[in-house]
Amino acid sequence: MKHFLLAAAACAVTLSVPTFAADPSFSGFWKLEGDFATLKTIDGKIPPMNPEARKRYNASVALRKQGKPVPTDTVQKCWPHGLPRLLLAPYPIEVLQDAKQITFLHEAHHMPRLVYLGEKLPALDTLDNNYMGFSVGNWDKDTLVIDTAGFNDITTLDKAGIPHSEALVLQERVRLTDNGQTLEDVITVTDPETFTKPWKARISFKKMPNDYWLKEMVCTDKNPDAA
């Protein structure tokens, strides 16, 4: 009887241990919803640029209206889009996910984006500035919080020409909605050298069939918009 009571107690202890749901899976193929040639704030406004940034932005918009190339547009030179502009490209993305890393494979330029899970963002002055920055991710319940910094200042945030500096820091809150059929990304943009205050934008991606294959995309000076 004594042994039976001990076994029952052990079983009760085992059953009382709380269980936690696994992190949501973003794996699969996704495609941007809507047209984001111009990236606007969540309330539909042009981001709050300082006077110098606004001047550069207006010059870019004016050239596009005239049908002329924009010298500061990296995509027209077949250079990388940078972020968040790569997320705004109207081409599919494949997401690969494991416990330590989430990889976004973009059909545009076949550009990979690596998000290291469970890590902290290093100090800005320790990062080697580049087109895509350095991304780390951490889970906040069902939301993946991605922090990215370490950018160069060569790219623009969108096709319209929103500029940024090397002080740019992005924070994304990514989560599944619509019963897993939509991937929502709320982006907070912070860059005190370009904007008068931080601002947010919201984009979303629709789930694509699992049998999709990323297609080859080659950018040349004859068809730079292919990227």
Image: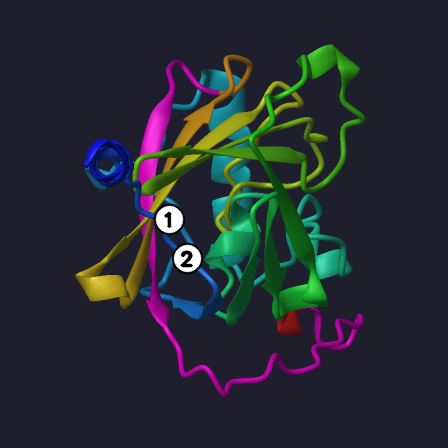
Cβ atoms at labels 1 and 2 below 8 Å apart: yes
User: How far from the left and from the top, in percent, is residue 27?
Assistant: 48, 64
131 to 108, vertically: above or below: above
Q: Residue at x 57, y 24 (%)?
A: 168
Q: Could you say which is closer to the camera, residue 221 or residue 115?
A: 115
Q: Can residue 63 be seen from the camera position used here?
A: no
- Circle nearer the viewer, 1 or 2: 1
Q: Is residue 76 shown left or right of residue 202? A: right
Q: Seen from this angle, which residue lies furthest front?
A: 1
**In the rendering, which numbered label is found on residue 25?**
2
Q: Is residue 207 shown left or right of residue 102? A: left
Q: Quadrant of residue 60?
A: top right
190 to 83, vertically: above or below: above
Q: Could you say which is closer to the camera, residue 96 or residue 198?
A: 96
Which residue carries the number 1 mark?
Answer: 22
What whole-number distance in Å separates the C-alpha atoms at marks 1 and 2?
9 Å
**In the rendering, which numbered label is found on residue 134?**
none
Give the residue type that dot 1 points to: Ala
Magenta stretch mostly in which secondary structure?
A: loop
Q: Could you say which is closer to the camera, residue 91 or residue 180?
A: 180
Give the residue type that dot 2 points to: Ser
222 to 9, vertically: above or below: below
Q: Residue at x 28, y 62 (%)?
A: 182
The stretch of residues the image draws in magenta is 195-224
Split into 4 quadrants, where in the image is the C terminus? bottom right
Label 1: state its secondary structure: loop
Split into 4 quadrants, where in the image is the N terminus? top left
* Tally of numbered discs: 2
